[in-house]
Image (cartoon, helix red, strand yellow):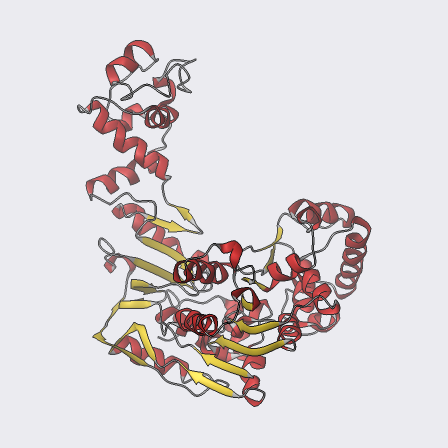
Amino acid sequence: MKTIILGPPGTGKTTTLLDLVDEFIRAGTNIKNIGYFSFTKKAAWEATRRAEEKFMIDAKDIPNFRTLHSFAFRTLGMKKERVMGHGDYRDFGVKMGIPIKTAWYSQEDGIFNSDNEYLRLINKARVLEIPVLDQYDKNEHSMDIERDVLYLIDQELKRYKQEKGLYDYDDMLEKFIKSSVSPSFDVLFIDEAQDLSPLQWRMVRALWKKADKTYIAGDDDQAIFRWAGADVDTFIALKDEVDHIDTLNQSYRIPGGPIHELSQQIIRHVSNRYDKDYVPRQEQGDLTRYSDVTQVDMSHGEWLVLSSANHFLDDIKELCELQGWYYSHKHRNSIKLDLLLAIQTWEKWRHGEQYLPVASIKNIYSYLGENVTKGYRTGKTMDENEEGGYSIEECSADHGLLTEAVWYKAFDGLDTDTENYIRNMLANSEKITQQPRITLSTIHGAKGGEADNVLVLPDITKSALDHNDMDPDELHRLFYVAVTRAKNSLHILEPKNYERAYVL
């Protein structure tokens, strides 16, 4: 029996799937005979974490909650040292005389990333399971790519891996499909099915052939990885193969009013989709539009800022630094937490806090530079076990400390921009935590995320605009995902170029 579970934004898809897992366990199914596979490592980890809490068990007791790549790797008994890494790709590039600075499969989603377009085309052809020259003929690449060279690199890469005994993420799936090692599951769950590539769909079919019951969960309206080879059309076509289709129809994220209305206006433009609807929360959300970035006030609350490409976020980064707002971008905080804590503890220390533990003092010393005598900068002269720590007077007398000046004079290695940014943060009483309250991200990077307040930049690249002529559904889905991250308020900044913008 196969069932599709459609989960519109915020409808609690993971919770629903784990409730089903719970029902099967209560009915006598061993959890080790349940397979739960997700497109992204993040989603697989989240399902595992929730299962640990829900069922009061350890992760080792649920070995089959993972990504498809991870499951193939583990089942086939592959070794980490045989997986193609940065160094292997760079070595291959040197042998071929082509520049390869980066080439790697994301640990989060298994998507291949590289600065070399030849490698990207080769990978795209593999996940789509088409000849590399057929991918070339789609004209989805730059004009600099040569057809004959692409074919040669493809053949030589295969030869290189074979000679070195190496394999990549796609090899894992292909080897699994060709093998006969697929276990039999009492129940099989496939999450985020809208993002699976044709190659991943083949592995899924190999799994469900040996499963008594299969649940395929996802939302075609949130399929935004077609550029990486995702095949949402296969997910939609499954409606003719399954026994049941269940739609989760209550969103616990999307507020009623203009945010819900805008999201529905966007998604109705998609031509090929499951016909479905959901009920928003009773609380009414707010929609605000801005003509200029300086009008945006993110001084309070949790924010998620989304754009179609990272470079569109530059103005927002400048605004955050001017205003002293703590933010993260590309999984990096705007200021290292260690530096912020060093400043915070230094100011308390010199203003009367008697003693600091050695770990805090070492962190401070790492930023004091010439204000600590040579030979003392590592804090090795201090006893880690010293009860109560050390006073600033003790450090000045015995442990090389040369100053008691205010932090921006004492921390002599800081550049002017960093100093000004931190001073603005402190002046605005910006809360210093492990996770900044403002996150800047591409829409693709924020898939599955949410925030009380969401700011969307509708600018799009020329290449995205050109591609939109061939597949308009892709942009509609992308910005549908963007606006449905908002839990309370949605904010839209007018584009810099209306000719290159999505109309929201």
Residue 329, how many percent across, how many down? 41, 51
Indicate left or right for 143 with 267 as reference.
Answer: right
186 is higher (above) or lower (below) than 107:
below
The answer to which image quadrant residue 316 occupies is bottom left
Q: Is residue 493 visible?
A: no
355 is higher (above) or lower (below) than 99:
above
Quadrant of image for the N terminus: bottom right
Residue 432, how many percent across, how many down? 28, 43
Indicate left or right for 364 with 79 as reference.
Answer: left
In front here: 493 or 157?
A: 157
Residue 391, how many percent across, how many down? 25, 18
In front here: 239 or 228?
A: 239
**Which residue corresponds to the image point at 49% horizontal and 55% vertical from the top-left?**
59
**Which residue corresponds to the image point at 74% horizontal and 71% vertical from the top-left?**
131
473 is higher (above) or lower (below) than 92:
below
In front here: 35 or 458?
A: 35
Q: Is residue 14 visible?
A: yes
Residue 274, how many percent across, how many down? 47, 85
Q: Residue furthest front?
A: 28
Q: Residue furthest top?
A: 397
Quadrant of image for the C terminus: bottom left
Indicate left or right for 442 with 214 as reference.
Answer: left
Q: Residue furthest left?
A: 352
**Which residue corresponds to the image point at 69% horizontal and 54% vertical from the top-left?**
78
19 is higher (above) or lower (below) than 402:
below
How many circles with numbers are drawn on the protein? 0
The answer to which image quadrant residue 52 occupies is bottom left
